């Protein structure tokens, strides 16, 4: 009689349906459990930001109830979209769905990843192979993809955007973009990028943030354009670490700005501003407060990969700052894990 290793199930924290609901009109993240709680916790700040009349509050209440419902349906609806896209969508650039090849990666990125995985690699040596944007905030930059691959990926994303396929919101703050797991790009592109290249690199840069224990991700592309999303309010990511790659196109404005870690009481009076460089990726801690300045002209597309380590987040959910209340979810969920009951192999005794 033998016992097989217990498989892991990816989950989300139950707080997803009540914490960090973003109200763009008032530039505020709120906790929402009931009307009474909302008034008690947020009425003064909401009034200061323009939510003054009963009609304003009822409109806000309706929007929050709608968002909670959307979040509760998210897993099954996302799985249904992914299945429909897989069966009915015809790509314009099918080569981007091929398994990730080193030829699509920038030489600088390959060199940094190769060094990080080598015997005797250390942080000092790695920092010689990338740009330190902020030593204090531990923000780094390096080229990630080649220009031809960025162009091919952009063409494919635009083709999908213009198709009649169903599209999910990239995250709870952005309205325009693409979820890569729904499009079928997780397995061939993002998973090998994380496992083969990002993990050794992040293990040296952020060993204290789970950089060496990355076991899941959430990847999406966000789009900023006139008449659509133009800026992004201050927030922190539901991730231990983040990769943000500028894909293009031609644009002005839209710089990223960074404050302190969300756990540190601070002001954003003098944030660090960082301009995008097409083809290059920024690496930062998920808990770093950040946002995006308004777009000036053109269109800006960015690939964002939230990198998660269950060994870290299983102890403390970064969104509610409590031990996670685990709820089964689709795919990688929100990166939390629990072990499924072990299976027992019963051998016939003779």
Image (spheres, rainbow, N blue to C red):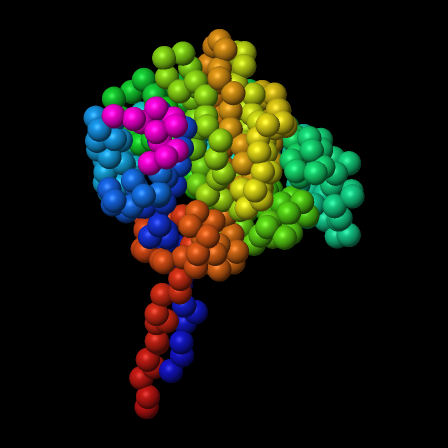
- Give the extent of the magenta segment: 43-53
- Look at the picture and state if 314 lies above or below 90: below
Q: Pick the residue in front: 112 or 241.
A: 241
Q: In front: 289, or 327?
A: 289
Determine the residue located farthest toward the bottom in the rendered image. Answer: 350
Was residue 49 drawn as part of the magenta stretch in this picture? Answer: yes
- Horizontal side of 28 relative to 261 (left or right) equals left
- For the N terminus, give its image quadrant: bottom left
Q: Is residue 101 visible?
A: no
Residue 251 painted magenta: no
213 w.r.t. 255: above or below: below
Q: Residue at left 66%, top 34%?
A: 140
- The quadrant holding residue 226 is top left
**Count of numbered circles on the image:** 0
Q: Residue at x 62, y 45 (%)?
A: 202
Q: Residue furthest top?
A: 297
Residue drawn at (29%, 40%) of the image: 39
Q: Position of residue 307 (x, y in %)?
A: 51, 44
């Amino acid at each position: 009689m033998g016992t097989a290793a217990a498989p892991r199930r990816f989950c989300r924290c139950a707080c997803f349906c009540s914490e960090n609901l973003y109200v763009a009109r008032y530039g505020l993240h709120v906790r929402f459990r009931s009307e009474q709680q909302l008034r008690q916790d947020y009425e003064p700040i909401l009034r200061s930001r323009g939510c003054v009349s009963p009609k304003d509050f009822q409109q806000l209440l309706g929007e929050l109830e709608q968002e909670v419902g959307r979040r509760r349906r998210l897993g099954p609806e996302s799985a249904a979209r992914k299945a429909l896209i897989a069966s009915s969508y015809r790509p314009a650039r099918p080569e981007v769905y091929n398994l990730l090849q080193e030829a699509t990666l920038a030489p600088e990125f390959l060199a940094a990843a190769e060094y990080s995985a080598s015997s005797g690699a250390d942080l000092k040596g790695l920092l010689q192979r990338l740009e330190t944007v902020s030593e204090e905030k531990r923000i780094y930059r390096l080229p990630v993809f080649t220009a031809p691959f960025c162009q091919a990926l952009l063409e494919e994303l635009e083709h999908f955007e213009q198709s009649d396929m169903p599209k999910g919101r990239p995250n709870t703050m952005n309205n325009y973009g693409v979820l890569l797991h729904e499009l079928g790009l997780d397995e061939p592109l993002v998973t090998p990028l994380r496992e083969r290249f990002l993990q050794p690199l992040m293990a040296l840069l952020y060993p204290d943030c789970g950089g060496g224990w990355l076991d899941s991700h959430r990847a999406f592309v966000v789009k900023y354009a006139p008449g659509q999303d133009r800026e992004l309010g201050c927030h922190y990511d539901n991730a231990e670490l983040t990769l943000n790659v500028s894909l293009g196109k031609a644009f002005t404005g839209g710089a990223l700005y960074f404050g302190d870690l969300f756990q540190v009481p601070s002001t954003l009076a003098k944030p660090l501003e960082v301009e995008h460089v097409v083809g290059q990726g920024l690496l930062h801690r998920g808990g770093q407060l950040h946002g995006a300045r308004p777009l000036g002209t053109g269109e800006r597309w960015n690939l964002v990969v939230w990198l998660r380590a269950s060994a870290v987040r299983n102890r403390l959910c970064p969104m509610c700052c409590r031990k996670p209340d685990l709820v089964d979810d689709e795919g990688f969920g929100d990166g939390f894990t629990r072990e499924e009951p072990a299976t027992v192999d019963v051998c016939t005794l003779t």
